[in-house]
Each structure stands twice: as structure tokens, then as C-alpha cells.
Amino acid sequence: MYKPYCRKPRLAAILTTCLVLVLTASFALAHGDERPVKKGILLVAFGSSMPEAQVSFENIDTKVKKAFPGVPVRWAYTSKIIRNKMAKEGGKSLDSPAAALSKMMDEDFTHVAVQSLHTIPGEEYHSLLKTAHEFQGMPKGMKRVLVGYPLMASHEDMLKTVDAVMANIPKARKNDEAVVLMGHGTHHPGNIYYPAAQYYFGQKDANIYVGTVEGAPSLDEVLAELKKKNIKTAYLMPLMSVAGDHARNDMAGNEDDSWKSVLTKAGIKCVPVLKGTAEFDQVVDIWVEHLKSALSHFK
Ligand code: CO
């Protein structure tokens, strides 16, 4: 039923509501939200204490700065052991992701794209996600903090990673010689990316094998396959961003239990390749793509 007496109070209520909204908005603007947008990049790697491994980080740093000119780039390292070791032995103070984000917050960054330079979405990546999330929307802090995927996350990433790594296998390697890639491996459910990588590499080249130091597949499993195929020579390459301690000792070292020693003992000639995947431009391009997609959300 039509009630004409209702019209005036309704109009008044609407006007009052509008006024309140306008006042609230200007109040909010006057209290911090007018800060200019300041975008930044935080690159996060596991870290390595080996000076020879720094070439990997330098390559990423150069390529990221070239891809995103004018956007400040910071670094953080997820391994506490590495950070402590670097501080003690190298006299170098490295930031954890939380320390780096906190510094960026104090420097008035409003939008930060955090790029995980890890190989798989494992423990390091998932902790990084949590840390980044905690920094998003803090009072007077960053408005948005997004994390780019590690190297191998999607089906497309797996295809690209396979091509990128294969493009960097030494040209001298013949088709009947194997390539054994050493992944790190983890107790985290993300370890599944290593058997997945085996599948994707196998689709392109049946003589490429993926093994891990701390997860599955193990070296024993890889060795059983090499024996089945009567492989005589194997190129050993790290499926890790840096050719650090694992590559130099566990893979190519002279200790009895290194991959080189175990395979050599089994009658397979080994050719170690001491290069981390981050030394390969095609691999770095994949991380840069992930970073680009994180940054594309800041519009
Ligand atoms: Co390790």
C-alpha cells in the first residue's frame, strides 16, 4: 500500500547515509590510504654458502632487473642454516623472507611480488606463502603481497622446464648415453613433482632420469633402470637452481656414496656437469614468467 508520508524520511535517510559514506571515505584517505603505489620485487632462494653457486643468483638478478626496469629488487633466503653460515663464515648478513618483507614495509612498499626461486612447491615454498600472507594488509603496511610459483608448478611449467633443461645438456652427449638429473627431494607431499618430472622428461627422451637426494625416486631406482637398459655412460646434472654442496659432493664428489662413485662402481662412466639450473637462461625465463604473472595482479 502506498504511504506518501514515508517519502520524506526515506529521502533524508538516504542523504544521511550518503554523507556518512563520503565522510568515511575522506577520513580513510586522510589516514594512510593515499600513499602512492610503490611496487617491489622480492626474490627468494633457498640459498647456498658456496661461492661457486653465486653465479646462479647473479644470473637471476640480472635477468629480473632487465625484465622489470625501475622496480626495486630485493633478495631473501629461506634456509636458516645457510643464513647463519654466511653470517659466521662469510661475514655476510642475509635476510630471511620475513626480515626482507619487514624492511620493505618500512620503506613504504605497497605492492610486493615475491618470487619463489625454488624448484618445486615443497616445504620452502609453502612456508613462504604463509609468511607473505601474514604481511599482506598489515596496518600501515603492504596492501598486497603475492607469491610467484616455483619453477615446476603446472603442466605447462613441466613442459617448459623439460625443454629448458634439455637445451643445456652438453652437446657431446649421444642418444644412447643417459642423463641423470639430481633433484633435492623432500618429505613434503610436493616431492611428487620429481616422479612427475621423470614422466615429462621420459616423454621427450627415454634416456633421461630423475633421482633425488632426500626423496623419491632414489639413486637405487635410477641405477636399476640404467642397468636394465645397459647404459654405459651417464651425464650427471643437478636439477637444482645452484650447483652447490649437493651437486659438488653428493653428486660429483669422490666419496664412496656419491652418485658418481656408485654409478662408476656399477660400470657406468660418469660425466658430471656442475651447473645449476639457474645458470640456464631458458630456466630463468620460467621464473621470470611466474613473476610477471604475479606482478600483473597489481593494476
Ligand atoms: Co639439502
Image (cartoon, grey):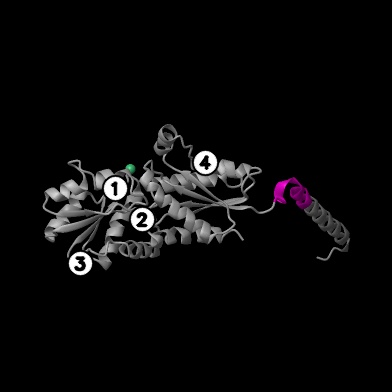
Which image quadrant for residue 204? bottom left
Image coords of residue 189 (percent x, y)? 34, 49
Q: Quadrant of residue 87?
A: top left
Q: Nearer the viewer, mark 3 or mark 4?
A: 3
3 or 2: tag closer to the N-terminus: 3
The residue carrying mark 2 is 277
Q: Is residue 199 above or below residue 79?
A: below
Of 116 and 73, the residue lying toward us: 73
Q: Which residue type does callout 1 highlight?
A: Ala
Amino acid at dot 4: Ala
Which image quarter: residue 196? bottom left
3 over 108 or under it: above or below = below
Distance Cα–Cα, label 2 vs label 1: 11 Å
Few, some or many residues within 10 Å of mark 4 (<14, 14–19, 20+)? some
**Residue 154 shows up from this direction:** no
Verify CB contact (< 8 Å) between mark 2 and mark 1.
Answer: no
- Dot 3 falls on a residue whose secondary structure is loop
**For the residue carrying disc 2, how many other residues have a C-alpha within 10 Å: few (<14), some (14-19), or many (20+)?**
many
Estimate the spatial distance between the alpha carbons at disc 1 and disc 4, rounded to whole Å: 28 Å
Location of mark 3 (residue): 175
For label 1, count other residues whose C-alpha is less than 10 Å away and answer few (under 14), some (14-19) or many (20+).
many
Label ID, residue 247: 1
User: Does the Cβ of the disc 2 residue fall within 8 Å of ligand 1?
Assistant: no
295 or 262, which is in the foreground? Answer: 262
Q: If you read the primary sequence from the N terminus, does the residue marked by circle 3 or circle 4 appear first? A: 4
Q: Secondary structure at mark 2?
A: helix
x and y percent of residue 120 in the render?
38, 53
Mark 3 to mark 1: distance in Å? 23 Å
Q: Is residue 163 left or right of residue 67?
A: left
